[in-house]
């Protein structure tokens, strides 16, 4: 995990009380930068212009469900980890979420703070590793293509 | 060949009738339990968020108080400033706890009116209030999908078996919600009309097919999949409204547009002869 950059957490729940409680806990225990949204559309807008490490979303919300939101989040920032925090305790929605949006974790309400924190920390680490991996891959790609160029020039010089 | 026995046949008929009545009552009770089961799922969802908040806030408040205690003991200026800021957070969390507790209480109150033990008693009730608490119970099922609009007129207290009427409202509301695929709207309207209260519940659902309309109030008729509908709800509702309260229940429906149920309950109940 990069140490100089604060981890960025997005929390989406149509109930303000959930955001306030989770925020208060995370701000007390961590140095994370917390962005809370009661409107999933606002969270989507935020993610279009700001890098995010993890998005935690409620399931049942007016206008846009948690699964729809996380699907959008996946499109915008595929490396950001996605967590569904839901009181809607049915297996069907969990399975749907895991299959459709490549969910990182599924947490049931009422949530356990320590458990949620652990999941968020691991999720942040995961997204950082994914980003690092992508950087390394692109570095490798660049190195590879410049090597190829050198090889080509060498061949041209000799032939 | 045995001789016909009119007395024996009459006895048999009476006992058969008693059996049928007992079975009908049993079915009605089973239907109520099935509805309650479905409701409970919604209620669990309704109170999970406030409970999660309260538990989390409690932890934060305890941690903050410990911080404050240590800061006060040490007298360290930065620690005191930090603790002071944390006190502000705690105040807002305490305010949230209050809202969360009210939310839970509201749901529990709604549940209580639904399963009142003294349901057999006739009493004066505010039907707007009854409908409002029934709506609270269905909130979890509809949330995020179905918008509820209420248009409550001023109503006189209505002499009724309130918990039985709540079952009727619940039934029609749940049906309305289930008839809506995807997003939609349910409008509940109450008005006084002469000596009766008129409650209309309109949905923007799939509507009732013309062929099915005559069967809607028949016991055992359902278009819902197994496990979703018992096919008893509306026949039971009709009995509660018409036989128990001397009111009326009917509906208008258009396929693809929606259905509106009209329930009329007299404000005063006729004194029963046995009284």
Image (spheres, coloured by chain):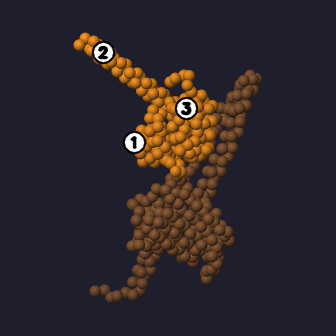
Chain colours: A orange, B brown
Q: Earlier in the sequence, mark 1 or mark 2?
A: 1
Classify the position of the C terminus of chain B by image quarter. Answer: bottom right
Measured from the top left, where is residue B1 in percent x and y?
28, 86
Which residue is at the far top?
A158
Chain letter of the residue beneath label 3 in the structure image: A
Instruction: Give the mark nearer the N terminus: 3 vs 1.
Output: 3
Q: Nearer the viewer, residue B6 or B68?
A: B68
Mark 2 = which residue?
Answer: A153
Q: CA distance from mark 1 to mark 2?
A: 48 Å
Q: Position of residue B17 (x, y in %)?
A: 44, 77
Return the residue at label 1: A99
**Splitting the image into 4 quarters, where does residue B56 fall?**
top right
Residue found 43% across the figure and 43% down from its top: A97
Return the residue at label 3.
A8
Which class describes the residues within 10 Å of circle 1: few (<14), some (14-19), or many (20+)? few
Report the residue at 57% width, 49% height from top: B47
Q: Is residue B44 visible?
A: no
The subunit carrying tag 2 is: A
Examine the rendered structure and indicate whether residue B115 appears above or below residue B19: above
Secondary structure beneath label 3:
strand
Q: Are marks 2 and 3 in one subunit? A: yes
Q: Nearer the viewer, residue A72 or B214?
A: A72
In the picture, measured across the screen, residue B11 lies left or right of residue B72, that is left
Select label 3 or label 1 by which is in front. Answer: 3
In this rendering, does residue A29 appear at all?
A: yes
């Amino acid at each position: 995990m990069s140490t100089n950059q604060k981890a960025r957490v997005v929390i989406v729940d149509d109930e303000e009380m959930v955001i306030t409680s989770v925020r208060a806990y995370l701000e007390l225990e961590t140095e994370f930068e917390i962005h809370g949204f009661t409107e999933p559309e606002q969270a989507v807008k935020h993610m279009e212009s700001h890098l995010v490490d993890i998005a935690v979303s409620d399931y049942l919300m007016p206008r846009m469900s948690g699964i729809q939101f996380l699907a959008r989040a996946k499109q915008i920032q595929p490396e950001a980890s996605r967590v569904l925090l839901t009181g809607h305790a049915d297996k069907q929605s969990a399975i749907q979420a895991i299959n459709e949006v490549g969910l990182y974790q599924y947490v049931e309400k009422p949530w356990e703070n320590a458990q949620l924190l652990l999941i968020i920390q691991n999720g942040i680490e995961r997204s950082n590793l994914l980003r690092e991996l992508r950087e390394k891959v692109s570095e490798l790609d660049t190195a590879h293509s410049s090597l190829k160029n050198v090889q080509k020039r060498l061949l041209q010089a000799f032939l | 060949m045995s001789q016909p026995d009119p007395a024996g046949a009459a006895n048999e008929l009476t006992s058969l009738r008693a059996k049928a009545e007992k079975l009908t009552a049993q079915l009605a009770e089973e239907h109520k339990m099935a509805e309650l089961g479905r409701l409970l799922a919604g209620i669990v969802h309704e109170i999970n968020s406030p409970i999660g908040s309260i538990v989390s806030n409690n932890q934060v408040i305890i941690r903050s108080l410990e911080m404050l205690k240590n800061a006060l003991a040490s007298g360290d200026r930065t620690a005191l400033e930090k603790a002071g800021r944390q006190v502000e957070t705690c105040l807002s969390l305490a305010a949230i706890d209050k809202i969360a507790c009210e939310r839970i209480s509201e749901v529990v109150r709604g549940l209580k009116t639904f399963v009142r033990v003294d349901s057999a008693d006739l009493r004066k009730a505010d039907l707007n209030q009854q409908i409002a608490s029934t709506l609270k119970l269905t909130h979890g099922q509809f949330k995020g999908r179905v918008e509820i609009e209420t248009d409550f007129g001023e109503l006189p207290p209505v002499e009724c078996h309130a918990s039985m009427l709540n079952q009727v409202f619940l039934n029609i509301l749940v049906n309305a919600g289930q008839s809506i695929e995807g997003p939609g709207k349910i409008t509940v309207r109450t008005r006084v009309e002469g000596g009766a209260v008129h409650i209309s519940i309109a949905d923007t659902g799939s509507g009732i097919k013309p062929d099915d309309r005559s069967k809607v109030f028949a016991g055992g008729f359902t278009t819902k999949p197994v496990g979703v509908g018992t096919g008893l709800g509306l026949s039971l509702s009709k009995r509660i409204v018409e036989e128990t309260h001397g009111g009326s229940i009917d509906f208008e429906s258009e396929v693809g547009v929606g259905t509106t149920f009209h329930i009329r309950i007299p404000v005063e109940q006729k004194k029963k002869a046995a009284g």
